[in-house]
Image (spheres, rainbow, N blue to C red):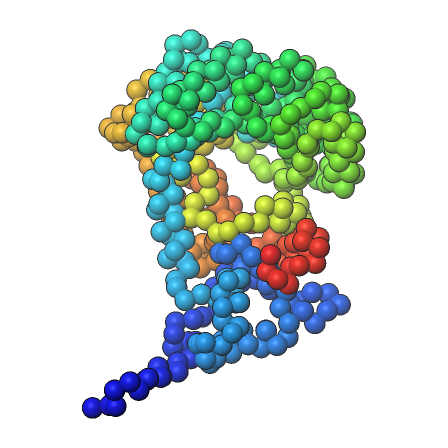
Amino acid sequence: MEPTGQIQERPSRTAGEAGWHVSRYNLSARIPDSKMVAIANLYKGNCAEYTPIEMYLLSVLEELDENHPVIERFAKRGVIANFDERAALETMGRIGGAFPWGVGLTICPTMGCNFDCPYCFENHFAGKMSAEVQDDVVALAERMMEASGSERLQITWFGGEPLLASDIVESLSERLIALAEKRGATYVADIVTNGYLLTQDIVDMLDRCKVKSAQVTIDGMGATHDATRRLANGGPTFERIVSNLRDLKIPFTVRIRHNVHEDNRAEIDELEAFIGAIAEESGNKLEYYPAPVSGNPAADARDERVGLLCDTDASEVSIRQEASRFSVGRGHYCGAQSMWAVGIDEKGNLQKCWEAVDKPSISFGTAHDWDPANPLVTAKSPDNLTMYLNTTSPVPDEECRECVFLPMCVGGCPHKRLFDKRSCVAFKDDPKSYVLALHARIEKKDGGSAADGK
């Protein structure tokens, strides 16, 4: 018997014995002209600076006492963990495919387009959504909200060029907003448009319809843009789009996408500065981001080659794009892997990916018939639904499961995986450049506080 009242000290354990290990999702790079090292943890979504002493402590982590003060700091930043991060990602993937985070509808009121862009992944055709199909869309939205119990309705207006059917955008918006209000749900909308048809009346209508952001593509300066972003009759579009962005009062954010290819990559910096100048002059919130052009069967069928960027050439562009949206790790890539997100073409066909809205052959059902409360029985083609849902974590690819970039790409675009090939991040073989881009961005944003793990 030990004397009563005597406090027994717990035997000391090492951090390794306590279950701590260095994260499998760390990327590191020495900061130029410095003894410091930047480490980005892709699971936690954190990038910070580390001193030589901290790097040494990290290298001998499992030998440290479990109560060493550096343990808490490392854990907060995510560079060490005491759980299986990959298993956590896989669980997030399973949950993400079924969890009703919100109901998301990508609605194409028309598949027609007033542009003829050679790299477009769609084959366009005339026609607008009928009144009957519009009724089906509203009824589907209500069924999805009822089945999911969701309190959020997210609408993306897509096409074709959705503003060729602006009357449908307006009338359907009113009905969907009313549905959300009836259910006490949040309503959020955005639009993907080429920007050519914007007028002040259209902008004001979109604002009334609770559109919070728009994506407009500009492919370079003047003639460079007009070479790929041209009207169906071959006419130019640059000046009209720029005038719309400069002269209209736009109350929502406009994200300017630059589809980068060999013929316009030299204009990245010039275009970004140009967009910034327009934003300052107009007072409109314009946000520039570059994205490499990738190949697709529809573009190939046009037999007009745009200079695609190979993986190596696309690396710099991809680093800029990904560094600007650095975030915590996730379990699934996009809404195509969720039960509660669907695309709807103008005839009411349902798709799991907006890159497939022009392809009824891989539709899984219709807005009239599909019931998410009984999704497989009411699906016209269940395989076209399940093949997307089954691409979520655990990723069906052992190389992906072992990859350090898994929290970021989660196996890549499911549509490309199913119908083309796996899409890896372009800078997969150059992780140091990505880390340094993250470090520079965070240091600039936080005034040099990257070392604090912000």
Q: Is residue 351 visible?
A: no
Q: Is residue 392 visible?
A: yes
Q: Quadrant of residue 119?
A: top right
Left-right relation of 249 to 166: right
Residue closest to the eye, 157 or 312: 157
Q: From what the image shows, is residue 396 above or below residue 76?
A: above
Q: Looking at the picture, how far across and down is residue 172, in whole percent?
A: 47, 15
Residue closest to the eye, 334 or 311: 334
Q: Quadrant of the N terminus?
A: bottom left
Q: Looking at the picture, how far across and down is residue 205, in whole percent?
A: 59, 16
Q: From what the image shows, is residue 172 above or below residue 150?
A: above
Q: Quadrant of the C terminus?
A: bottom right
Q: Looking at the picture, how far across and down is residue 340, in whole percent?
A: 37, 33
Question: Who's the residue at 44% across and 36% down the image?
Answer: 335
Residue closest to the eye, 411 or 85: 85
Q: Quadrant of residue 255?
A: top right
Question: Who's the residue at 39% across and 49% down the image?
Answer: 92
Q: From what the image shows, is residue 181 above or below residue 332?
A: above
Q: Looking at the picture, how far across and down is residue 237, in whole percent?
A: 72, 21
Question: Who's the residue at 52% across and 16% down the image?
Answer: 169
Count of numbered circles on the image: 0
Question: Who's the residue at 36% across and 32% down the image?
Answer: 150
